[in-house]
């Protein structure tokens, strides 16, 4: 007999046992269902009916008492919702309840019938004994009517009997329901016990059949199991001997074919793991899921390797590129410089130019970092375009740029000058230039590090020279002012010093302190363009002359902007005569619209004008000058700057010097 027939026989035995168990369970369930039907069809409705009768009995007694206490107009049957009608409805409903209890077969046993009849007789007796209460109530004798219903009348005693009847009846219904419930539970428990017993028996028989079949399995099954366990633990070098021609023998042969397939697949996987992705992989059949998955994995690995190589190249490019300007960065420069320093041929020179922007920090603080970034992007594009193919442009970081190129002859100088020109941009309120240094390999240096040091040193030497140029331009203008107003040179110096100290107390940055000091020193530079006939007029100026005089701030702005090294302070010179209340000139600015530096210069100029002796005016004391500043605080001057200057002045031991009146200062 084949293994298949043995298994079918065992399965038929187990199925027969399960069918028998199922039939038995159906019989027991039918019995339990009958118990539940009895409980649901009679016990529960009859118990609910007794509860309804009890409630109606109490409602009737309540309506009696209500009738006694009611107004006469509420008692006739003709009155809407009359109390008399309620009493009659209660009696009619009670009669219907008792008839229904009999007609619907809710009587469960003789005791239930006895209790029903006893309650009906006692209720009728109570109704008869309490009947006179209605007449007495209508006659206006409520106390006598109440005695008929309650104590000490006979009806009250009958009421106690009624309550005892209904209590006994209710207890009987509860006991009957509990008995039915206990019977149903007992039947259920017995059914469960019998089913469990039969199920245990069926399992025992099935287990016995399984043991018998297990003992009769061939050695091939045990060998296959041992081989499968070894394979599950990773040892695929297994061999199963085919010992029979039945199904077990066929299974052993198929298992051996599977192990051969796994060994071949592992060999392919090891080849891939060794890094050889060129291995050819093809499924053995349409159902070869592992072969298809291995082929898909290999293709994915090939794509992944290609993508990794692409990303690696991109990351190397990003690591050597400045994010903002897209120019090569310092890392790229160092790499290119080291590489190209060793490639310099005879008659060739490697030119290295380092550039540092002049005025960029001030531009950033004035217009904001987004505008500063946009400026860097524009300058980078100009620099790249300027050097073209002759050199490579780099951004070192911040406001520093670099060019590197292989040249012959004098090409290097031309390249670095074009680059410097490209890093130049001017606007209405700014001027950006650059300082730069150049080094050649070989010649100035023999290594990349030395070339960077030389170029950097030359760049900062040029930056120092440019800074002195700003001072020289300012001195030239001051000398020109001295020619027309020699007595004011000390005034300009004092105003510059006071304005710088005041700005420093406000925590302004160093470059802003220098800008305010420069503007304070040159705040009246526009008077160079005012005719001497107006400046030196001994008497008061007429309206036309005042109008011309007030233009000196605009002229001063133009003079400052004409010199690139002074242009950054031009706006402060223009606004140095604005007033806090907006009545100043030339633009009528007010409050916070006036540049902070111009506000500081205005207060310091007025203070020094009052405390300095002039040919046409005596000085006033420091206390009087501060009092005058405070008097004009909020109208002519910023209150915060006035108080700050007052603190600075009163905290020093410097004696006061003469000044002229505030309203006379120009």
Image (cartoon, rainbow, N blue to C red):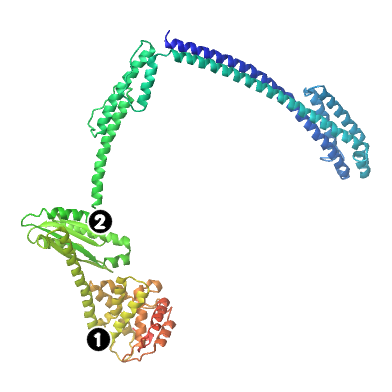
Residue at disc 2, secondary structure: loop
Residue lying at the far top in this picture: please name it: 1
Q: Quadrant of residue 337?
A: bottom left
Residue 547's disc is none
Going from N to C along the chain, the mark reached first, 1 or 2, is 2
Q: Are marks 1 and 2 in contact (CB under 8 Å)?
A: no
Q: Nearer the viewer, mark 1 or mark 2?
A: 2
Q: Residues within 10 Å of mark 2 (few under 14, many from 20)?
A: some
Question: Does residue 457 appear to the left or right of 503 in the view shown?
Answer: left
Residue 161 is situated, as x and y percent measured from the top left of the image, at 88, 33
Query: Is 392 in front, or is 178?
Result: 178
In the picture of the structure, the residue carrying the numbered disc 2 is 325
Residue 301 falls in image quadrant: top left
Report the side of 338 relative to 649 (left or right).
left
* x, y percent for residue 461: 18, 69
Q: Which residue is mark 1?
A: 484
Query: The residue tagged with tag 1: helix, strand or loop?
Result: helix
Q: For residue 560, what is the image quadrant? A: bottom left
Q: Nearer the viewer, residue 88 or 632?
A: 632
Residue 86 or residue 78, whichever sits in front:
86
Give the Cα separation between the discs numbered 1 and 2.
50 Å
Q: Residue at x 22, y 83 (%)?
A: 479
Judge whether 251 appears above or below 571 on screen.
above
Q: Quadrant of the N terminus?
A: top left
Q: Tell me if mark 1 has few (under 14), some (14-19) or many (20+) residues whose alpha carbon lies within 10 angstroms of its own.
A: some
Residue 171, x across and y down, in percent: 79, 30
Residue 420 drawn at (x, y percent): 18, 64
């Amino acid at each position: 007999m084949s293994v298949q027939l043995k298994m079918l026989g065992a399965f038929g035995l187990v199925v027969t046992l399960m069918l028998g168990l199922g039939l038995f369970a159906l019989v027991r369930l039918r019995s339990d269902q009958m118990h539940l039907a009895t409980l649901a069809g009679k016990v529960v409705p009859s118990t609910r009916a007794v509860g309804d009768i009890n409630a109606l009995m109490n409602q009737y007694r309540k309506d009696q008492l209500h009738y006694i206490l009611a107004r006469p107009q509420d008692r006739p049957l003709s009155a809407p919702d009359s109390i008399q009608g309620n009493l009659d409805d209660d009696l009619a409903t009670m009669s219907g309840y008792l008839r229904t209890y009999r007609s619907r077969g809710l009587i469960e046993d003789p005791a239930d019938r006895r209790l029903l009849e006893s309650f009906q007789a006692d209720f009728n007796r109570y109704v008869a004994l309490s009947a006179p209460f209605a007449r007495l109530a209508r006659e206006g004798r409520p106390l006598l009517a109440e005695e008929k219903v309650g104590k000490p009348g006979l009806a009250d005693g009958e009421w106690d009997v009624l309550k005892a009847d209904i209590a006994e009846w209710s207890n009987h219904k509860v006991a009957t329901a509990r008995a039915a419930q206990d019977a149903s539970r007992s039947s259920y428990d017995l059914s469960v016990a019998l089913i469990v017993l039969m199920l245990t028996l069926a399992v025992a028989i099935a287990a016995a059949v399984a043991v018998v079949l297990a003992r009769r399995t061939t050695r091939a099954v045990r060998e296959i199991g041992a081989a499968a366990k070894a394979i599950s633990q990773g040892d695929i070098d297994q061999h199963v001997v085919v010992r029979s021609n039945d199904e077990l023998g066929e299974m052993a042969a198929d298992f051996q074919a599977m192990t051969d397939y796994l060994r071949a697949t592992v060999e392919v996987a090891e080849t891939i793991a060794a890094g050889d992705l060129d291995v050819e992989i093809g499924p053995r059949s349409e159902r070869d899921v592992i072969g298809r998955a291995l082929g898909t994995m290999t293709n994915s690995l090939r794509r992944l390797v290609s993508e990794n190589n692409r990303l690696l190249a991109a990351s190397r490019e990003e690591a050597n590129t400045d994010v903002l300007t897209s120019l090569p960065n310092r890392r790229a420069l160092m790499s290119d410089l080291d590489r190209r320093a060793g490639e310099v041929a005879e008659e060739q020179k490697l030119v290295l130019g380092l550039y540092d922007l002049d005025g960029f920090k001030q531009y950033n603080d004035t217009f904001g970092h987004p505008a500063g970034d946009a400026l860097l992007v524009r300058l980078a594009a100009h620099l790249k375009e300027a050097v073209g193919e002759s050199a490579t442009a780099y951004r070192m970081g911040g406001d520093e740029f670099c060019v590197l190129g292989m040249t012959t002859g004098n090409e290097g100088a031309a390249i670095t000058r074009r680059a410097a020109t490209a890093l130049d941009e001017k606007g209405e309120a700014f001027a950006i230039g650059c300082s730069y240094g150049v080094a050649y390999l070989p010649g100035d240096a023999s290594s990349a590090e030395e070339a960077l040091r030389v170029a950097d040193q030359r760049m900062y030497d040029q930056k120092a020279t440019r800074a002195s140029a700003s001072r020289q331009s300012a001195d030239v203008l001051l000398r020109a002012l001295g020619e027309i107003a020699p007595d004011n040179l000390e005034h300009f110096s004092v105003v510059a010093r006071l304005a710088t100290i005041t700005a420093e107390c406000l925590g302004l940055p160093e470059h802003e302190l220098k800008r305010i000091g420069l503007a304070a020193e040159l705040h009246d530079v526009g008077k160079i363009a005012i005719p001497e006939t107006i400046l030196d007029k001994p008497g008061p100026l007429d309206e036309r002359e005042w109008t011309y005089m007030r233009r000196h701030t605009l002229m001063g702005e133009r003079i400052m902007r004409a010199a690139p090294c002074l242009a950054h302070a031009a706006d402060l010179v223009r606004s140095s005569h604005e007033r806090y209340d907006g009545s100043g000139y030339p633009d009528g600015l007010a409050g916070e619209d006036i540049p902070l530096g111009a506000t500081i210069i205005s207060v310091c100029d007025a203070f020094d004008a009052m405390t300095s002796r002039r040919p046409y005016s005596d000085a006033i004391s420091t206390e009087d000058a501060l009092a005058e500043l405070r008097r004009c605080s909020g109208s002519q001057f910023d209150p915060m700057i006035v108080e700050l200057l007052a603190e600075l002045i009163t905290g020093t031991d410097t004696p006061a010097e003469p000044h002229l009146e505030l309203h006379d200062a120009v």
